[in-house]
Amino acid sequence: MLQFTLRLVTPACAVLKTAYCEEFFTMKSGIHPDYQPTTIRCACGAVYETGSTKQNITVEICAKCHPFYTGKQKLVDTSGRVDKFNRKYGIQ
């Protein structure tokens, strides 16, 4: 019973070695860009080491200086819309 269940879970390619399976699971050569280590630099001075197909990426804003992540985000009330809503519906 256990052996039957395992065969249902494994793909057919794993049980029967066919030419289609080998072609399906191997990447084609010559069509993929080179994945290499790179450095990402932010305008605030933060530096991140990662991997990419591009080298030396520069960004204007990152997680260290973005207002949403630093907690310095300000809610901007344009032309008193919140006060207008509160007055309209009698909310204090």
Image (cartoon, rainbow, N blue to C red):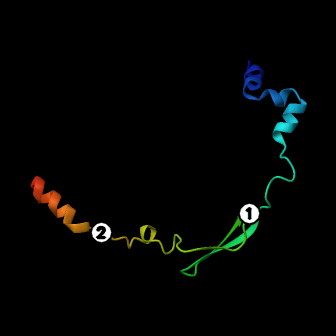
Disc 1 element: loop
The kind of secondary structure element at disc 2 is loop
Circle number at residue 79:
none
Asked if labels 2 and 1 touch by Cβ distance under 8 angstroms, the answer is no
Residue at the image point whose x is 58% and y is 78% from the top: 46
* Residue pictured at 29% horizontal, 69% vertical: 76
The quarter of the rendered structure image containing the C terminus is: bottom left
Q: Earlier in the sequence, mark 1 or mark 2?
A: 1
Residue toward you, 15 or 87: 87
Percent position (x, y) of residue 82?
Answer: 20, 62
Seen as rendered, the residue at the extreme front is: 79
Q: Can you name the residue that lies furthest to the top here?
A: 1
What amino acid type is highlighted by mark number 1?
Thr
**In the rendered view, does 24 fall on the left or right side of 43?**
right
Q: Is 84 on the left or on the right of 3, as rendered?
A: left
Per the model, the C-alpha gap separating discs 1 and 2 is 39 Å
Horizontal arrangement in the rendering, residue 4 relative to residue 78 (left or right): right
Q: Amino acid at mark 2?
A: Val
x 77%, y 29%: residue: 11
Task: Please provide percent x and percent y for residue 51.
Answer: 71, 65
Query: Which residue occupies the extreme left position in the image?
Result: 90
Residue 3 vs 52, above or below: the answer is above
**Residue at the spot x=75%, y=26% of the render?**
6
Q: Which mark is residue 53?
A: 1
**Residue highlighted by disc 2:** 76
Residue sticking out furthest to the bottom: 45
Q: Quadrant of residue 45?
A: bottom right
Residue 79 screen position, x and y as percent: 22, 68
